[in-house]
Amino acid sequence: PWAAKLPGPPVRAAILCPRWRAYETMELARRLEMDAEHLYFDGRGALTDPDGWPYRTQTGIGALSPGIAERHGLRICTDDTRDVILVAGLNGPALPTRLRQAILERVRAGKGLVLTGDATALAGWPKELFATPDAALAAPVLAAFAWESIPGLRKDERGRMGEDAPWKGYRYGAGRVVVFTAKLGAYSSLVPLNDASEGLDGATDRILAAQAAAVLAAAGRPLGARIAFSKTPLKAATPASLPASVAGEEVADALVRVQDDHDAVVWQGAQKFAGAAAKLALPALPAGRRHFVDVLLRDRAGECVGLGSAVVEVQSGPAIRSVRVAIGPIVGDLGAYAPDGSEVVLTASGAHGWVDQRSL
């Protein structure tokens, strides 16, 4: 559930995104307690586009008039009760000038803004919006998640843009701006483009949790508790504990999930913490798989006060490196099965010079 239950009221958000990229913003709302209103664009580069509705003649359903769509956008973005505006997967110039100016005024007055996408997402916005970096805004996201292990954000992968971290924070007037820079998938507004074929459900879940933390930071409501994990490798096939340190707000317990890189949940349950130095009890994990430990820190009311995720490296134990089979002696036609009395010798070798030989 990640931050689906927050202390205090839900985060009130105005969300602007292409209508065919809205799935991930709705999935974000399952992981972050939000009161959201959407303005759906007909494409990355246009608020309304009649050509985006090819069956409008047959169905009678087509694009809104530009005036109606823009007025709806102005209504939700200038609503003073909104904490944050999320502009996801849009080209900057797609926003009508009046709507963009209204958003800038709200941010300057103290609201939050989150922008996601590649370089085109930043086009059309004034340079002053990114003139005052504030690393502290993005720090909770970068510290809480092993983001370089997420498909698409790993080094030299298609979704990643440059060597810098994808989340960056800025101050604009009294407001906060968080930018997530990445190449997005064709139907994505929050998840980077990637070539992975396995483990995508877990990876998507983690990056949406990281985006939830980014939205909270922009809204001025960062979570009060933080968790940092030790990088101690664990032994395979042996129950272990993962050392962690907890700081900030008081934590009553943690909901812990251990998941492998094929999305199999190995273990899930609640664990109590005693003080700042915590040890997460982990089940016996097999070698050869990457495992993720996802943690939701909760207060006494069961509400989310912190979250984080770590990659666990499991040390490999003894392993068979090679197998050789020899059959002999064979008497008779070599094309026939080995006759009774023949000997089969199985030789296996492993790490550290280990060799075993068996006659079958």
Image (cartoon, rainbow, N blue to C red):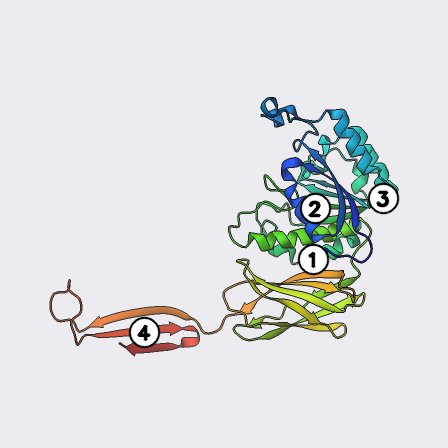
Residue at x 68% of width, y 65% of height: 255
Q: Secondary structure at mark 1?
A: loop
Amino acid of disc 4:
Thr
Task: Point out the residue furthest to the left here.
Answer: 332
Q: Secondary structure at mark 2?
A: strand
| Whole-percent x, y for residue 50 in the image | 65, 24
- Residue 225, quarter of the rendered image: bottom right
- Name the residue tied to disc 1: 2
- Name the residue tied to disc 4: 347
Q: Is residue 44 above or below residue 223?
A: above
* In this rendering, position of residue 80 left or right of residue 274: right
Q: Nearer the viewer, residue 235 or 56?
A: 56
Spatial separation of the CA atoms under disc 2 and disc 3: 24 Å
Q: Are marks 4 and 2 in contact (CB under 8 Å)?
A: no
Amino acid of disc 3:
Thr
- Name the residue tied to disc 3: 81
| Whole-percent x, y for residue 229 in the image | 68, 67
Tag 3 or tag 4, which sits nearer the N-term? Answer: 3
User: How crowded is the residue under tag 4: few (<14 C-alpha within 10 Å), some, or many (20+)?
Assistant: some
Amino acid of disc 1:
Trp
Which numbered mark, 2 or 3, is in the foreground of this view? 3
